[in-house]
């Protein structure tokens, strides 16, 4: 019992966040409570209040937790990509892999959380949703190098984000049957559009 109490003392905040994400993904927001989350973690009903004032604070922490990890994965993909012409593919694979590994994150973040994306060309990058801004900055850099028409760049950013997001949505749905690995097919999917700025330079 002493070891179990020590374990929960050290990891309880993250345990509650992860449990909350899973709970909302499976049951929705109706009836969501700190009491239910505590029950999922096997701790007392009062224990969550040492980290979260109420359920709204926990929901915000859940959103921030996923966003931070998502952003870190995208930034890592950009940093580790050695070839400029492959950076968009690396970013797309990181996007896919992150949510395939954590499908409940996708369900909660884009279906139950309060995130907001500003898709207008002159959106404030500091206030906009960080993962989208990471993706956007990479696409802008590629489009600039390819001399893609300025007036069409925002359309391309939105279309590419929607494309990656749509593939990820399919990949995280339990009722979608597909025999191949989504990450491995991403390049083939992109080539269907035959976008000039996606072609590797020789």
Image (cartoon, rainbow, N blue to C red):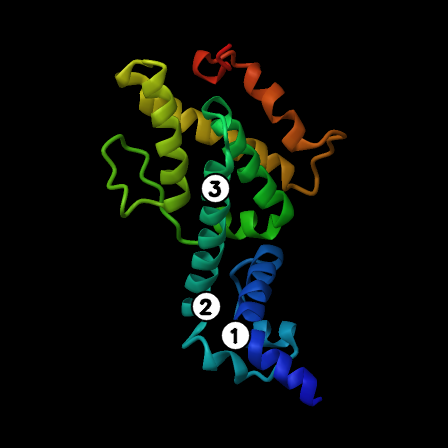
First of labels 2, 1 by sequence position: 1
Q: Secondary structure at mark 3?
A: helix
Label 2 with label 1: CB-CB less than 8 Å? yes
Residue shown at the point (49%, 50%) measured from the top left: 109
Residue shown at the point (31%, 17%) measured from the top left: 152
Q: Give the mark toward the camera: 1 or 3.
A: 3
Rendered position, 100 above or below 170: below
- Give left or right: position of 79 versus 1: left
Q: Give the mark toward the camera: 2 or 1.
A: 2
Measured in 3D between alpha carbons, the distance from the residue under mark 3 to the one under mark 2, in whole angstroms, is 24 Å
Rendered position, 161 above or below 43: above
Query: Percent position (x, y) of residue 196?
Result: 45, 11
Q: Which residue corresponds to mark 2?
A: 58
Q: Secondary structure at mark 1?
A: helix
Query: Percent position (x, y) of residue 96?
Result: 58, 38
Rendered position, 24 above or below 50: above
Could you say which is closer to the camera, residue 25 or residue 75? 75
Given the current orientation, which residue lies at the most extreme front position? Answer: 82
Q: Residues within 10 Å of mark 1 (few under 14, many from 20)?
A: many
User: Is the N terminus in the top left, top right, bottom left or bottom right quadrant?
Assistant: bottom right
Picture quadrant where residue 182 is located: top right
Q: Residues within 10 Å of mark 2 (few under 14, many from 20)?
A: many
Q: Which mark is residue 74?
A: 3
Measured in 3D between alpha carbons, the distance from the residue under mark 2 to the one under mark 1, in whole angstroms, is 8 Å
Q: Secondary structure at mark 2?
A: helix
Q: Which residue corresponds to mark 1?
A: 34
């Amino acid at each position: 019992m002493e070891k179990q109490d020590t374990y929960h003392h050290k990891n309880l905040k993250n345990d509650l966040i992860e449990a909350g994400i899973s709970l909302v993904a499976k049951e929705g927001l109706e009836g969501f409570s700190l009491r239910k989350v505590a029950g999922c973690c096997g701790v007392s009903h009062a224990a969550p209040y040492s980290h979260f004032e109420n359920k709204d604070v926990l929901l915000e922490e859940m959103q921030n937790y996923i966003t931070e990890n998502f952003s870190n994965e995208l930034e890592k993909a950009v940093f580790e990509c050695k070839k400029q012409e492959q950076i968009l593919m690396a970013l797309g694979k990181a996007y896919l892999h992150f949510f395939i590994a954590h499908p409940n994150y996708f369900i909660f973040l884009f279906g139950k959380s309060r995130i907001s994306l500003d898709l207008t060309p002159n959106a404030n990058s500091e206030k906009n949703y960080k993962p989208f801004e990471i993706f956007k900055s990479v696409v802008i850099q590629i489009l600039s190098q390819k001399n893609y028409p300025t007036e069409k760049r925002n359309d391309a950013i939105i279309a590419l984000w929607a494309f990656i997001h749509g593939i990820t949505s399919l990949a995280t749905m339990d009722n979608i049957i597909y025999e191949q690995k989504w990450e491995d097919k991403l390049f083939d999917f992109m080539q269907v559009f035959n976008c000039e700025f996606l072609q590797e330079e020789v």
